[in-house]
Every structure is written in C-alpha cells, then in structure tokens.
Image: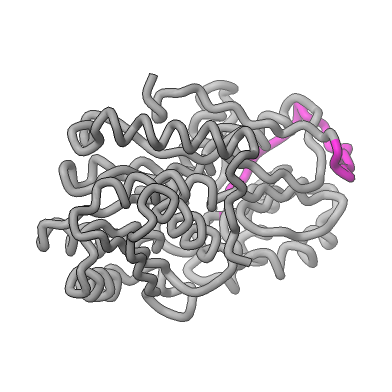
C-alpha cells in the first residue's frame, strides 16, 4: 500500500488535554471557514481546508459558509460576516490569525473556533498544529537519495518558526540518508506576501540550482508554482508541500509532503455535529497519519524500491521514537 493511499486517522481525543466543551447544540451547527490569505484553489493549504469542508458537506448534507480575506487584518470582519449568516463553528486557516482569534473568541463565546497552524488560548478555541518536521524528514530522505549532485535545497516563504519546522526536518532527513549532503536554505520574502510570489520563488530556486542543488523542497504556498516551473525549465526536481502536488509537473515533482489540513477541518466539524467538540490543543504527526509523503502515477517512476524502503524504515523509527526529529526551535 502506498503512503498516499494509506488510510489516515487523526487522534483528536481529549485525553491529556485541558479541554473545555462548548454548549452549542450539535444539531443546529452551521460550519464556516476563513481561509488563509491567498488563493482558495492554491493546490496547497487552502485547498486542503476546502477539501475537508467539502467532504464534511458530502457526508452530512450540511453546507458551510466561507470567507476569503485579502489580508490578515480582515479576519474579524470575516468572522462577523460568517456569524451574521448563522455560523456556529468557525475553522480558521493560517498562523497569522493567532493574535486576533483570542479577542474575537472572547467576543463571541457561544461560537466554537478551530485554529489550524497556530496556538491561542480560550474556552471556545481548538488549536490544531502539526509535526511538520516529521513529514519533512521523510522527503529530506528522498531528496538526498534522488540527488546526483549531492546538494539539495529548501525554499521557504519566510523565516518564521512554522517554516523552520519544515527546513529543520528536511535537513535532518537529508543528512540521515546521506551524511555528506549539502543543504541550501533560502526564503522568498520577509512578510506573509512571500506565500503568494511565484516570480520571486522562481528566482530563489534558480539561484539554488546555480549553486549545485538538483532537488529543491518548496515550502512557500502559491510561490511554489514558480519554484516548480523553474525546476522543470532547468531539468531539476522539486518537492511539493501540504497537498499532493505531484500532478502539477509530472516527472519534475519528486514527491509532495502531505499536511492533512483537510482532516483537521473535517474532524473539527464532525466533532461539533456529534456533540463532542472540545477546546484545547492537538499536535498531529506521522503516528496520527497527519503528515506523510505522496506516491502516485505522476512520480512513481522517480522513486526506486530502495528509496522507498529507506524512507519507510525512517518512518517506523520516527513513530517508534528511535529518531527524534528537531523542530528548528
């Protein structure tokens, strides 16, 4: 069974959490979704959230209301627009909402908020974060094994703790597979706009190719499109992120690191519907099926049985605790 077809299970129980259930009636729930700034169909983070909401709607028949902000400052405006339409459960996508959601949640104590990718405190806030470093470790193993030059690269959107989890895991995984590998690290920009700048993403990737990298892990949202195009044009390999992006450039994308935002959104909505939603923090990694790498018809020929054997061995070691993966902090 390939990793992308393996059934993913999120462990979202309240055990060990200082969790607080909210009293809103489950049978009256109306879900809402506030996307990260960017594009809804970004083949990445936002699209993963959309997929989770769509799957919930298909399974339950309950429609959801969505809001796409043009900048992070519109978060409160977006929540207000959703609540005016009767929304009881708001899933918010993006680390930059962490500072705003606490105040908004206090203002609307009867509303259940789920924040994906950051931490905030409140009796009506559920936070879902990921062990991105564990998934990045696996694609780092594959990058090092696929590299012919012995140099691989990571192109992140900007230098923040969230992105450092990706870069740290990637570098550790690459060095685990190949001790003499060289790992390049660069960023697209210094503000959240770096997630939506394919032109600069392409420039940064080309600079890494010029310095010898032949496999580049793209962790930059919509900017990945420029990185992928640069890899194709230069005969190099790239690695996607968040969603399965293999199909965008078959033969160029070595694999994609999956970050199951879709499952986080769907699980939160289902918990609210079933009456067992609770506040608190969930941290999800390989053991929960929340991060992974993708294998399908678009990249299978790029991954040899030996490569897959090594990366699966690494997976087992991480889940068993034999390989602790650094998070860049």
> Is residue 26 found inside the magenta-colored segment of the image?
yes
Residue 323 x, y percent position in the rendering: 58, 44
Residue at the outermost bottom position: 190
95 or 131: which is nearer to us? 131
* Residue 41 visible in rendering: no
The reply, left or right, for residue 65 in relation to residue 29 is left
Quarter of the rendering occupied by the C terminus: bottom right
Q: Is residue 310 left or right of residue 238?
A: right
**Vertical arrangement, residue 17 with respect to residue 10, above or below:** below
Decide: is 203 above or below 251: below
**Total marks drawn?**
0
Using the image as rendered, state which of residue 200 and residue 28 is in the foreground.
200
99 or 32: nearer the viewer: 99
Instruction: Please say if 301 is above or below 75.
Output: above
Q: Position of residue 203 (x, y in %)?
A: 23, 75
Magenta span includes 70:
no
Residue 155 at least partly seen: yes
Q: Which residues are magenta?
A: 16-34
Q: Position of residue 167 (x, y in %)?
A: 47, 62
Main secondary structure found in the magenta portion: loop
Percent from the top left, x then y, of residue 169? 50, 55
**Residue 325 falls left or right of residue 222:** right
Would you identify the image quadrant in which residue 204 lies?
Answer: bottom left
- Say which residue appears at 88% left-offset and 37% top-offset: 23
Q: Choose between 103 and 167: the one closer to the eye.
A: 167
Q: Residue at x 39, y 56 (%)?
A: 179
Based on the displayed image, in which of its 4 quarters is residue 301 positioned?
top left
Asked which colour scheme the image uses, the reply is one colour
Residue at left offset 11%, top offset 62%: 234
Extreme residue in the top direction: 1
Position of the N terminus, as image quadrant, is: top left
């Amino acid at each position: 069974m390939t990793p992308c077809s393996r059934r993913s299970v999120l462990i979202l129980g309240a055990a060990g959490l200082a969790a607080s259930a909210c009293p809103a009636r489950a049978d009256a729930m109306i879900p809402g979704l506030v996307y990260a700034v960017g594009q809804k169909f970004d083949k990445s983070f936002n699209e993963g959230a959309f997929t989770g909401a769509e799957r919930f709607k298909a399974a339950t028949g309950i429609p959801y209301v969505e809001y796409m902000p043009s900048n992070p400052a519109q978060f409160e405006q977006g929540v207000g627009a959703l609540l005016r339409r009767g929304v009881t459960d708001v899933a918010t996508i993006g680390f930059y909402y962490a500072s705003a959601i606490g105040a908004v949640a206090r203002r609307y104590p009867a509303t259940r908020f789920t924040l994906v990718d950051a931490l905030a405190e409140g009796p009506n806030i559920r936070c879902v974060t990921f062990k991105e470093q564990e998934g990045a470790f696996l694609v780092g193993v594959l990058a090092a094994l696929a590299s012919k030059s012995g140099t691989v690269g990571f192109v992140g959107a900007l230098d923040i703790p969230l992105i450092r989890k990706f870069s740290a895991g990637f570098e550790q995984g690459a060095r685990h597979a190949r001790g003499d590998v060289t790992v390049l690290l660069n960023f697209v920009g210094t503000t959240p706009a770096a997630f939506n700048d394919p032109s600069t993403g392409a420039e940064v990737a080309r600079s890494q190719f010029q310095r010898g990298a032949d496999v580049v892990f793209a962790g930059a949202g919509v900017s990945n499109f420029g990185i992928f195009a640069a890899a194709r044009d230069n005969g190099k390999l790239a690695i996607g992120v968040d969603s399965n992006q293999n199909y965008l450039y078959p033969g160029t994308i070595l694999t994609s690191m999956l970050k199951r935002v879709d499952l986080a959104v769907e699980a939160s909505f289902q918990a609210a519907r079933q009456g067992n939603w609770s506040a608190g923090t969930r941290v999800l990694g390989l053991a929960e099926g929340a991060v992974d790498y993708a294998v399908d018809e678009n990249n299978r020929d790029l991954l040899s049985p030996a490569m897959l054997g090594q990366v699966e061995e690494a997976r087992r070691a991480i889940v068993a605790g034999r390989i602790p993966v650094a998070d860049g902090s």
